[in-house]
Image (cartoon, grey):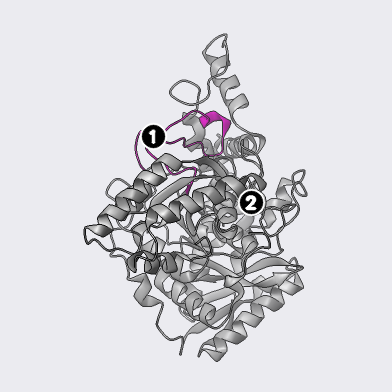
Amino acid sequence: MHRLTLAEIARGLAAKEFSAEELTGALLARIQRLDPQLNSFISVTPELALSQAKAADARRAAGETGALLGAPIGHKDLFCTEGVLTSCGSKILHNFKAPYDATVVARLKAAGTVTLGKLNMDEFAMGSSNESSHYGAVKNPWDPQRVPGGSSGGSAAAVAARLLPAATGTDTGGSIRQPAAFTNLTGIKPTYGRVSRWGMIAYASSLDQGGPLARSAEDCALLLGGMAGFDPKDSTCVDQPVDDYLAALQRPLSGLRVGLPKEYFGAGLDARIADATLAVVEVLKTLGATVKDISLPNMQHAIPAYYVIAPAEASSNLSRFDGVRFGYRCENPHNLEDLYKRSRSEGFGAEVQRRIMVGTYALSAGYYDAYYLKAQKIRRLIKNDFVAAFAEVDVILGPTTPNPAWKLGEKNDDPVAQYLEDIYTITANLAGIPGLSMPAGFVDGLPVGVQLLAPYFQEGRLLNVAHQYQLASDWHTQAPAGF
């Protein structure tokens, strides 16, 4: 049963080929047996999962239907989950059990999903390798000596290893799309404001967005349909109807205009990933798409702009973790200043401290205009580039990452080298547009992904293109050896 996709599970449950309780029990046993190799879970919740599975079976027996009713999933460990440890991968929240459900969790729970556990992540979602977690690094199931990508690396590794069919993730600068590319999955970052951030512990509030990781575009459409929608509790959530993502999958691609930015194919891109990307283009052409060369001239400024804006917002958001109200508190503080200083220095890891310091500096008197304000101006130029491009094309296509997954520890001594791996993904977060990564082949046995970008609230278009491509290819069906 572990080989079934989310869509196949929905059909199997509807046909009574198996029960949600049977499926949940099988996956829990698989997690117990295999996850020690990967470290993809922070918390496994067998009692909660089995009770939710029994409730889902009872709802089906009573005549209720629903594609997600009884579907087993996991949540990235920054979505508050009532009564369950919600740690953000950090020592500072090592004992925090959320008193409520995040909107995403509540919506999926209402749809009947079964929560198998909370998934490992880079601490406070800060990282591109899932090595900064207080609970240890996550291993890539395609090669346990390599990273699975970050910060949603636990979600990606668990889905890729068939420990569960789909999982939630979050994307601040590529943290759904990059791990999807590294583990042969499909992952989508929706438009900013499409999915509620209420109850999602913040890293950078103007960039964070929740979304699904799964094995196919069809599965992502199912899960995103359950996550998306207006939430009055989130002031940044947009009150706009949610498209029928499943219906959108079936549209033909005839007449689709695909843009190829010249900036994506310059120095720094592995030539083999470039070839894989262009091979996807050729398949789309056979499906009726046309291709146009375009330019995103301000892309070169994206990384410096992002690494000013995101740390600045992190500096503000993480100020609440002070050792007073909740979370980690140092032993025997001498006074209030000592309490703050030691609780934060002992509770936060090195990468989080680094970003807090950078952000605090960028916001400080005398530097705000020179760094933060200038970065926001660059952000607007990047958005304008996309607006101009989408006047000519329907979607933009390019590589998700410049390189395949690197070895564990390989870039730990050079944070900037990790930051540069986000070159293709962070522009979507700066502009707020939706982005999707889908499997596109292998380099030296390691998966690589291709990224699709679309105008605001065109998630259905991205899922449609990915689904049609996946009907014409089989990269997304391949699983890592041993899993």
Q: Amino acid at mark 1?
A: Gly
In x, y percent, where is residue 323?
A: 50, 22
Residue at horizontal 33 percent and vertical 58 percent from the top: 69
User: Image quarter for residue 399?
Assistant: bottom right
Q: CA distance from mark 1 to mark 2?
A: 29 Å
Write down the residue under mark 2. 128
Write down the residue under mark 1. 83
In this view, the residue in front, 254 or 223, is: 223
Residue interval drawn in magenta: 75-101
Question: Is 444 left or right of 353, judged from the image as shown?
Answer: right
The residue carrying pointer 2 sits among few (fewer than 14), some (14 to 19) or many (20 or more) residues within 10 Å by Cα, namely: many
User: Image quarter for residue 97?
Assistant: top left
Q: Which of disc 2 and disc 1 is earlier in sequence?
A: 1
In x, y percent, where is residue 385?
A: 52, 69
What is the chief secondary structure element of the magenta stretch?
Answer: loop
Tell me the tag on residue 482.
none
Q: Are marks 1 and 2 in contact (CB under 8 Å)?
A: no
Q: Is residue 245 magenta?
A: no
